[in-house]
């Protein structure tokens, strides 16, 4: 069963909020084949991605970078940098995101 995330802007196979405070949160997301976290950015928080099942791909803009992560690998996307997340070649993936330090927001952008 897919669940909505970030104010119903996109769907994920599963979302587990592990911990959340005013300035820090840890979420585990599972993306089914074909699902993605669409292009967006955060005003204050950095996203620290940790691949749990993959491979997965994190893409950024300005500068453009592509991080292909296998289980156990990680990358960080700083605040205010647009990014997009998916399974490699549209496949399934599962990852943890540590977000902070600061107030979480989700600012979608066009592709």
Image (spheres, rainbow, N blue to C red):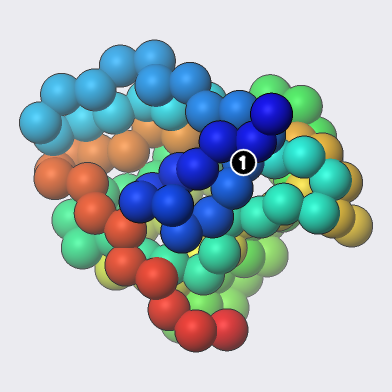
The residue most toward the front is: 1
The residue most toward the top is: 18
The residue drawn where x is 43% and y is 27% is: 27
Observer-nearest of 110 and 58: 110
Evaluate whether residue 18 shows in this view: yes
Residue 106: % across, % down: 32, 58
Left or right: 86 in relation to 12: right
The residue drawn where x is 70% and y is 40% is: 31
Which quadrant of the view contains residue 80?
A: bottom left
Q: Secondary structure at mark 1?
A: strand
The residue drawn where x is 38% and y is 49% is: 6
Compared to 64, does 105 lie above or below? above
Observer-nearest of 71 and 111: 111
Left or right: 104 in relation to 50: left
Residue 43: % across, % down: 20, 63
The residue wearing badge 1 is 12
Evaluate whether residue 30 shows in this view: no
Q: Is disc 1 surrounded by few (<14), some (14 to 19) or many (20+) residues within 10 Å?
A: many
Compared to 87, does 9 lie above or below? below
Please state, as top left, top right, bottom left or bottom right, where the N terminus lies in the image: top right
């Amino acid at each position: 069963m897919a669940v909505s995330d970030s104010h119903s802007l996109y769907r994920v196979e599963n979302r587990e909020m592990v911990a959340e405070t005013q300035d820090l949160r840890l979420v585990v997301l599972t993306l089914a084949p074909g699902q993605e976290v669409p292009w967006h950015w955060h005003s204050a928080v950095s996203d620290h991605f940790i691949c749990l099942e993959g491979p997965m791909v994190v893409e950024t803009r300005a500068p453009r970078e592509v991080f292909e992560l296998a289980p156990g690998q990680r990358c960080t996307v700083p605040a205010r940098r647009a990014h997009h997340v998916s399974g490699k070649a549209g496949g399934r993936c599962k990852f943890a995101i540590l977000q902070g330090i600061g107030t979480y927001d989700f600012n979608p952008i066009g592709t």
